[in-house]
């Protein structure tokens, strides 16, 4: 059945309405628990007011919702299917000669579109909000209202200076005092040739990253067979920006869907592992298909031609348990991909394909039965 038919439009309207209703309820519950948890954390901080707490919670909610989004869709689909079965609308549709697949087609279409809107429009906003949350959380931990999201744990950077030279930089601490300037302290740079042999080592009290260059100050240069030399400053050209370094200290979830491909390419060219970012990007790409798979799971448990057979609570509990099993197994396989035990494509697509194939098999059995 085509989505633009009268019945198809009606089905789409029902699933979208139930989705937003469930989403709002879950948002309210998440908001309440997040506020309680944050109030507990700042109970000994008289300098933290309600405005900061509410702003921080609002910045974190999109990240939390991203985690439970498939469950929201599954619950919305279960409510939709249960109402169709209870009101005998599904029986009427079947009596009109529409198969279960014709019935599900408009709903799956609407769910897939919601998934696309989520990754293309909602995700960039949510990632920016989560980045702001991480900055606020860092300020809360450091008790510095002007702190930015950098760390005292140090920073490692690897960059190809040209075809024959590679620079490996290590800084013990990083600070940012304005948007375009970054200050690195206790800096060490190894200059390597294409065979990873050390050409010379450069130590500096600090380095300033500004206008596509590192300017090292109070520099000591070590080179094999030569005495140590001291110079006032040394400059290195670089393609690294403060935003790129900042991404070392934030989760991939705080990077927009549209910015992830560029970030992945940057890490690959710099010699860093981009597995976390690749997994995040693929998980976003596959999220519309995951939502459709969760709708199929809901159809197995809630789409029944005869609502008088009973066992409604059993079906609801069974659907919720099945959703948790899908989520838990996907997280385990995701962890395998993150640690390099399995290919990242397999880590993302295996749970979705298994869930969809099992659900389709059960629905085919019910349809024939």
Image: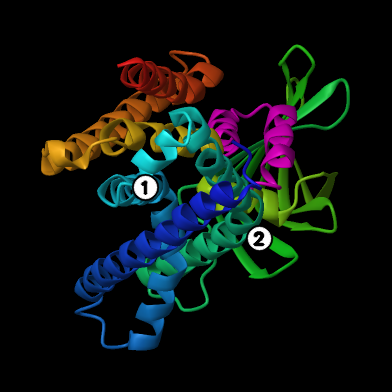
Determine whether the residue tagged by mark 2 lies in a helix, strand or loop: strand
Position in image of residue 318 (x %, y %): 18, 34
Question: 109 or 326, which is in the foreground?
Answer: 109
Q: Is residue 190 visible?
A: no
> Mark 2 or mark 1, which is nearer to you?
1
Determine whether the residue tagged by mark 1 lies in a helix, strand or loop: helix
Q: Which residue is mark 2?
A: 183
Question: 205 or 150, which is in the foreground?
Answer: 150
Position in image of residue 218 (x %, y %): 71, 54
Q: Which mark is residue 89?
A: 1
Query: Quadrant of the image for the C terminus?
Result: top left
- In the image, taking residue 251 as reference, residue 85 lies left or right, namely left
- In the image, taking residue 329 as reference, residue 164 lies left or right, namely right
Instruction: State which region is magenta.
Output: 257-286
User: Label 1 crowding class (10 Å Cα cut-off): few <14, some 14-19, many 20+?
Assistant: some
Q: Is residue 317 visible?
A: yes
Q: Is residue 341 magenta?
A: no
Q: Is residue 266 magenta?
A: yes
User: Label 2 crowding class (10 Å Cα cut-off): few <14, some 14-19, many 20+?
Assistant: many
Which residue is drawn at the image coordinates 43% and 78% (left, top)?
55
Which residue is drawn at the image coordinates 75% and 11% (left, top)?
195
Real-space CA distance between mark 2 and mark 1, rounded to the nearest whole angstrom = 66 Å
Decide whether the magenta segment is chiefly helix, strand or loop.
helix
């Amino acid at each position: 059945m085509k989505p633009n038919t009268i019945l198809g439009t009606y089905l789409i309207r029902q699933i979208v309405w139930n989705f937003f209703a469930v989403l709002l309820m879950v948002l309210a519950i998440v908001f309440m628990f997040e506020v309680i948890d944050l109030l507990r954390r700042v109970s000994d901080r008289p300098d933290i007011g309600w405005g900061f707490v509410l702003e921080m919670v609002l910045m974190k909610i999109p990240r939390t919702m991203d985690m439970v989004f498939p469950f929201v869709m599954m619950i919305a689909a279960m409510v939709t299917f249960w109402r169709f079965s209870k009101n005998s609308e599904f029986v009427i549709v079947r009596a009109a000669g529409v198969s279960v697949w014709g019935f599900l087609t408009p709903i799956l279409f609407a769910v897939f579109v919601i998934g696309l809107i989520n990754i293309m429009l909602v995700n960039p906003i949510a990632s920016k909000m989560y980045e702001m949350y991480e900055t606020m959380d860092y300020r809360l931990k450091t008790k510095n209202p002007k702190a930015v999201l950098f760390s005292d744990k140090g920073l490692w950077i690897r960059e190809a200076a040209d075809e024959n030279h590679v620079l490996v930089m290590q800084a013990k601490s990083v600070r940012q005092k304005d948007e375009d300037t970054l200050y690195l302290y206790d800096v060490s740079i190894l200059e390597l040739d294409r065979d990873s042999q050390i050409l010379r080592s450069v130590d500096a009290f600090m380095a300033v990253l500004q206008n596509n260059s590192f300017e090292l100050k109070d520099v000591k240069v070590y080179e094999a067979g030569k005495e140590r030399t001291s110079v006032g400053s040394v400059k290195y050209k670089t393609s690294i920006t403060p935003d790129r370094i900042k991404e070392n200290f934030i989760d991939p979830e705080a990077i927009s869907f549209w910015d992830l491909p560029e970030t992945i390419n940057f890490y690959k060219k710099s010699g860093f592992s981009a597995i976390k970012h690749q997994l995040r990007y693929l998980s976003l790409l596959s999220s519309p298909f995951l939502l459709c798979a969760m709708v199929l799971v809901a159809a197995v448990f809630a789409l029944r031609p005869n609502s008088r057979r009973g066992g409604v609570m059993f079906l609801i509990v069974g659907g919720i348990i099945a959703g948790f099993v899908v989520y838990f197994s996907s997280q385990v396989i995701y962890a395998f991909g993150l640690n390099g035990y399995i290919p990242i494509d397999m880590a993302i697509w295996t749970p979705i394909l298994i869930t969809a194939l099992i659900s389709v098999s059960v629905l085919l059995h019910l349809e024939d039965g």
